[in-house]
Amino acid sequence: MKGSKSNNQMEVILNSIADGVFTIDLNKNVTTFNRAAEKITGISRNEALGQKCFDVFHSNICQTSCALEKTMRTGKEGIDLKVNILNIKGEEVPVSISTAVLRDKKGDLVGGVETFRDLSALEVLKKEITKHYTFEDIISKNHKIQEIFDVLPDIAESESTVLIQGPSGSGKELFARAIHNLSPRKKGPYVVINCGALPDTLLESELFGYVKGAFTDAKKDKPGRFALAERGTIFLDEIGDLSTALQVKLLRVLQEKECEPLGSTKPVKANVRIIVATNKNLTELLSRGTFREDLYYRINVIKIELPPLAQRREDIPYLIDHFISQFNLKMGKRISGVSDDILKLFMDYDFPGNIRELENIIEHAFVLCRGREITPACLPRDFIQKVLPIQETKSMNENTMDGVEARIIRNTLKKHKGHRGKTAQELGVHVTTLWRKIKKLGI
């Protein structure tokens, strides 16, 4: 009688909880299934009880890395793991799960308990916010980039030549591709060539092609990139590295809409939209006489100026989430994000390599990360070496970069069980430097 009353009280408590809760025995049979679990999955309590948990709770980790099974095997709790489940209608539902073991009065393992929270509304809101700051594959909430977003469809609709200026790694190619994808030429080819990657002789044949016999190894005609981009778009990256000789040939393409393959005496029509980009200051090159003035005014019809990442720091958290989503798909991992320490490091760092540098750091961290969250120990050593000296100029405060540095050193020391030599090696500093920092930061 007493046990029955206790069970009824437990059932009332479980049904009052907003999160879904179910328990299983050692054979993975469902023994408890609360009202919220019924609502989220669409499966009734009577249908769930006695069934195998993986037949009721269809998640994307059931067959490969079941969190509850791992908890029962290791005794280690799972907290706030993001997974997807299928409800009774076959619809995918994002949930956050936590797991723990169940033991009897003697302390013997008798089963496991899993709680799960429906994240559908949160995910919808997140997508709406992200969508507001996304244009094609470009992500930004920076006001300068948002202004470019506003006019990009109009730029794409025109046939005008576009000049994209911005530092290396700032996303020039993404904007060029977006212009092509939004243009009437979107069904045509999109061809990219880096003008700074090839010597003059090779670059000329790559751009304009050649005819059979143009030189010793020219056994047959070869179309150039302009021919391959016919009825489409060609993107000439690093236009500032183009030699003056090739600048003359490119000028002819822009003026006459035709190009001449190497060794040919007949020009070939070029029905191509031209987008160029550079990380150099072209007006400065003009003053030096290394860039032709007539070519400059031909390519500078519509100019897009991209700011460095250091001037759009508000984009850093969005870009981090974007790259994490990309690498999760690419590498088959389920990393949820970066630690607060890392976010503070990133927000304070100038990123001389811009977005590309941030992407490379995240990719490096993904390779080393074994948990659900990227921690300072996963970061590239050269990045750590760059940011630690920056932090020495900050005041001693747990909320400043000194505090972040202290936490990084503590975490790395803990990882290596206090071994200063291994800690210094991972952080990329000398042992005496580490000792000085430990003393300075009071670790």
Image: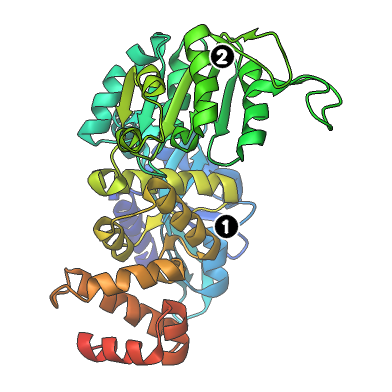
Q: Which residue is at a point 39% across and 9% down the rendered structure image?
A: 158
Q: Position of residue 44 (x, y in %)?
A: 47, 38
Q: Which mark is residue 122?
A: none
Q: Secondary structure at mark 1?
A: loop
Is residue 152 shown above or below 245?
Answer: above
Q: Is residue 222 left or right of residue 132?
A: right
Q: Position of residue 374 (x, y in %)?
A: 42, 62
User: What quarter of the picture does the N terminus occupy?
Assistant: bottom left
Quarter of the figure with residue 227: top right
Q: Position of residue 363 (x, y in %)?
A: 50, 55
Provide the residue designation for mark 1: 66
Q: Which residue is at a point 59% across and 50% down the rendered structure image?
A: 332
Q: Is residue 60 left or right of residue 305?
A: right
User: What quarter of the picture does the C terminus occupy?
Assistant: bottom left
In this view of the protein, which residue sits in the foreground, 119 or 26?
Answer: 119
Quarter of the figure with residue 190: top right
In this view of the protein, which residue sits in the foreground, 291 or 370?
Answer: 291
Amino acid, disc 1: Cys
Mark 1 and mark 2 lie on one chain; the one further toward the N terminus is 1
How many numbered discs?
A: 2
Q: Tag 2: Cα neighbours inside 10 Å, few (<14), some, or many (≥20)?
A: many
Is residue 43 shown above or below 71?
Answer: above
Q: Tag 1: Cα neighbours inside 10 Å, few (<14), some, or many (≥20)?
A: few
Which colour style is shown? rainbow
Farthest residue to the right: give it: 219
Q: Which mark is residue 232?
A: 2
Is residue 76 shown above or below 255?
Answer: below
Q: Which residue is at a point 52% across and 14% down the rendered structure image?
A: 252
Amino acid, disc 2: Gly
Q: Position of residue 143 (x, y in %)?
A: 20, 33
